[in-house]
Image (cartoon, rainbow, N blue to C red):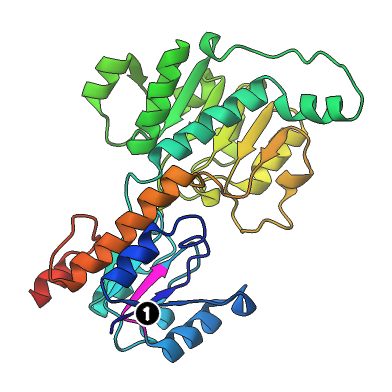
Amino acid sequence: MPIVLVSSRSFGQVSQVGTVILEEAGFEIHRVEAKDRPFDVAKLAEIVERVKPDALIAGAEPITRQVLSASPNLKVVQKHGVGVDNIDLDAATDLGIAVANAPGTNTEAVADLAIGLMLSLLRSVVDAAVSTRGGGWDRFIGHELGKLTVGVVGTGRIGRSVIERLSGFGTRVLAFDVYEDAAMAARMNVEYTSLEKLLRESDIVTLHIPLMDETRNLIAAEQLAWMKPSALLINIARGELVDEAALAKHLAAGKIAGAGVDVFTTEPPQSSPLLKLKNVIATPHIGAYTVEAMDCMAQRCAETICSIFAGQQPDNVLNPQVLQKGA
């Protein structure tokens, strides 16, 4: 009976769909126990070596060469999510291990949160709620989303879904992406432009790009200085896209009006300077945390593992050459 080790904290917690699929297919499921959390790379490698899984369902934890090589049986690493910047894809390929993600499964959930953070910041929803609970009755003045310009950095699945939502507000949308979607731009009345122009003209900037070497600290001190003092920054993609210290300085000095962040350079972000600022709405990486997204993600993860073990080649495998060699 093949073994699936679940190191992802969320797989099987909100949704049982994936667990049922795997068990009905004859897989034996082992989970990293609560007593073993939090764990570092060495601890996870030790667990993998002990369990000797055939498949690993990973969350945000680092899946390094040390972890990948700890089980001689490991055939697939399935990300319970979309971004795979925490998985050493080159090492997995060297070791003949397939790496897959679950693209499109959390698109709507993440796009919803992006809009929610925009509206919460524009209308001071958090401050107003806290004030009212404390006995206050202050009238907080805000802005209408439809009268503003929003800059969308990254027009992949999530970026496009954010743009679709913004179209309902009548918002002017600027976009930046190395791969421009001309058809979408024409259909949604989106203007592609340079990153600098987007940052200078946008009232809200929202990030929806993957973390890669070339996007790390894409928004640093120089780029933050281009933004309007009244502008808002939304980051629900990856914390490392933004120079966190520089962002905190600009926010504290009033050079940027506010930020909504669901992701941090280090998670949990116990020492992040952003947590001390009143003009920041911080959430604990909950972009994908809806019942619907969790069901969809769990199903995609389980079905991908089953497909690979059945000798198939799912289109969400990121290093398909590994499976082709074994075909």
Q: Is residue 310 visible?
A: yes
- Is residue 24 shown left or right of residue 310? right
Above or below residue 132? Residue 75 is: below
Read off the magenta span: 53-57
Instruction: Pick whichever, 90 or 47, lies toward us.
Output: 47
Which residue in the structure is indicated by mark 1?
68
SS at mark 1 in the image: helix
| Residue 114 image offset from top left, x and y in percent | 52, 33
Q: Please tell me whether the stretch drawn in magenta is mainly helix, strand or loop.
A: strand
Instruction: Pick whichever, 265 or 20, lies toward us.
Output: 20
- Is residue 204 shown left or right of residue 139? left
Q: Residue at x 18, y 59 (%)?
A: 314
| Residue 245 image offset from top left, x and y in percent | 67, 47
Above or below residue 102? Residue 232 is: above
Image quarter hosting the N terminus: bottom left
Above or below residue 58? Residue 300 is: above
Label 1 amino acid?
Leu
| Residue 100 image offset from top left, x and y in percent | 29, 62
Image quarter hosting the C terminus: bottom left
Residue 56 colored magenta? yes
